[in-house]
Image (tube, rainbow, N blue to C red):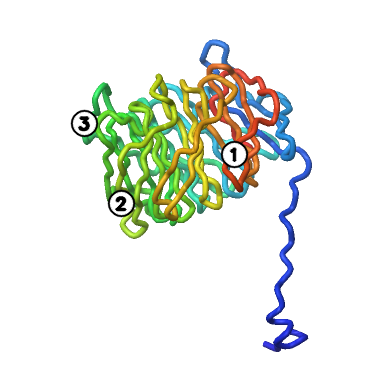
């Protein structure tokens, strides 16, 4: 190829970097709830938020999905997925363009509480809390899930102290895309599977145990891909985990404090900033968000302090797509609070009054 005009001088000159684009206009927000709970909602809450101010404005409800307690979106942004957290567990897909329910499929288990979409967009992964099982569904070109291609129930190791059986709480894909991991609160174990990209079947390749009674609930990877952070619901701790992308094996580190000061508390969910410098943990009971500095390229967490969440029982937290806002769904107060994220110092600042939404257990900003 011909050299650029201006020769060597032009090649060595610093290139102008365009400033990041400021978000403009309202963005959609979807809110999960329990339709069968007292005071619960009637479906998936519909709202929008201002990406600059964080102000949430409600716009109604998407009905026809029972107990949509956890939500996820397809990588192409066109389809919304919800668990139907009931005894006869199911997953439902909704086309966002016209809010039409595309399909509902049985998970084969009880009480699904988490789902995620494989980065390829071809597979829907769900975790059944009640039956301690994980399921895989294919996703067709329309975004609809097909009949289940696999179902695995965690039968070993035996349940941890105080548990009556397995309780799968999360099913997610590793950053390298080569493995899927299931976090089971009941067996104190994180299972690693290899997902067959053609058949949608699971092959177990590793298990990582926590200390007995930890009750692992939620795992979040550092963007570097070699470390992850585990929220342990039952013993009120967190742990740094080392991850080997080649084997898929996870190694759980020593327990660390959640920032709850020793009171009754149930850690719920971790988030890590896109640059990998800070992590945030939702604390139910202490009703706070713990702030951590991430050090050693992801290998260490250093607790910086906690910020009151401004609600009761923050079950789930999520970043806006640009990472500038953090949303907390507060189950018992029926509210969603919004924070502005200081990406330079890891600080959180409330943006305004909480948004009221019945039994808010999941907030998904797009």
Camera-nearest residue between 206 and 102: 206
**Residue 102, image x, y percentages:** 59, 36
Residue beneath disc 3: 158
- For discs 1 and 2, the disc positioned in front in the rendered view: 1
Q: Reading the chain from its start, which is encountered first: label 3 or label 1?
A: 3
In the displayed structure image, the side of residue 35 where residue 45 appears, left or right: right
Q: State the count of labels.
A: 3
**For residue 195, above or below residue 304:** below
Question: For numbered disc 3, what is the local secondary structure?
Answer: loop
**Residue 347, image x, y percentages:** 59, 39
**For residue 314, above or below residue 301:** above
Q: CA distance from mark 3 to mark 1?
A: 41 Å
Q: Residue at x 74, y 46 (%)?
A: 23
Camera-nearest residue between 355 and 299: 299
Q: Residue 249 bears which disc, if any?
A: 2
Q: CA distance from mark 3 to mark 2?
A: 20 Å
Q: Reading the chain from its start, which is encountered first: label 1 or label 2?
A: 2
- For discs 3 and 2, the disc positioned in front in the rendered view: 2
Q: Where is the N terminus found, in terms of image quarters?
A: bottom right
Q: CA distance from mark 1 to mark 2?
A: 33 Å
**Residue 90, image x, y percentages:** 46, 30
Camera-nearest residue between 317 and 163: 317
Camera-nearest residue between 37 and 239: 239
Is there CB contact under 8 Å for labels 1 and 2?
no
Q: Reading the chain from its start, which is encountered first: label 3 or label 2?
A: 3
Is there CB contact under 8 Å for labels 3 and 1?
no
**Residue 295, image x, y percentages:** 45, 50
Q: Residue at x 28, y 48 (%)?
A: 204
Residue beneath disc 1: 347
Image quarter of residue 167: top left
């Amino acid at each position: 190829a011909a050299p650029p005009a201006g020769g060597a001088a032009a090649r060595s000159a610093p290139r102008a970097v365009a400033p990041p684009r400021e978000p403009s206009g309202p963005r959609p927000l979807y809110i999960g709830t329990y339709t069968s709970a007292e005071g619960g909602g009637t479906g998936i809450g519909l709202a929008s938020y201002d990406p600059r101010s964080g102000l949430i404005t409600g716009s109604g409800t998407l009905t026809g999905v029972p107990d949509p307690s956890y939500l996820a979106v397809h990588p192409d942004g066109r389809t919304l997925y919800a668990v139907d957290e009931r005894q006869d567990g199911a997953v439902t897909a909704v086309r966002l363009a016209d809010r039409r329910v595309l399909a509902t499929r049985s998970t084969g288990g009880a009480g699904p509480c988490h789902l995620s979409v494989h980065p390829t967009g071809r597979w829907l992964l769900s975790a059944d809390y009640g039956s301690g099982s994980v399921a895989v569904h294919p996703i067709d070109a329309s975004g609809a899930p097909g009949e289940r291609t696999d179902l695995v129930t965690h039968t070993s190791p035996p349940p941890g102290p105080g548990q009556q059986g397995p309780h799968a709480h999360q099913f997610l894909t590793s950053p390298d895309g080569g493995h899927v991991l299931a976090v089971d609160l009941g067996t104190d174990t994180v299972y690693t599977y290899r997902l067959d990209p053609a058949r949608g079947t699971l092959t177990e390749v590793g298990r990582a145990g926590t200390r007995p009674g930890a009750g692992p609930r939620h795992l979040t990877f550092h963007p570097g891909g070699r470390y992850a952070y585990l929220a342990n619901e039952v013993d009120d701790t967190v742990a740094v985990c080392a991850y080997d992308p080649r084997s898929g094996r996870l190694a759980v580190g020593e327990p660390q404090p959640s920032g709850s000061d020793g009171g009754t508390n149930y850690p719920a969910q971790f988030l890590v900033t896109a640059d990998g410098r800070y992590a945030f943990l939702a604390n139910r009971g202490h009703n706070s968000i713990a702030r951590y500095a991430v050090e050693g390229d992801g290998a260490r967490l250093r607790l910086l302090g906690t910020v009151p969440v401004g609600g009761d029982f923050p079950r789930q937290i999520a970043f806006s797509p640009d990472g500038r806002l953090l949303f907390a769904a507060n189950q018992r107060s029926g509210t969603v609070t919004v924070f502005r994220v200081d990406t330079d110092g890891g600080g959180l600042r409330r943006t305004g009054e909480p948004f009221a939404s019945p039994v808010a257990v999941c907030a998904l900003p797009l």
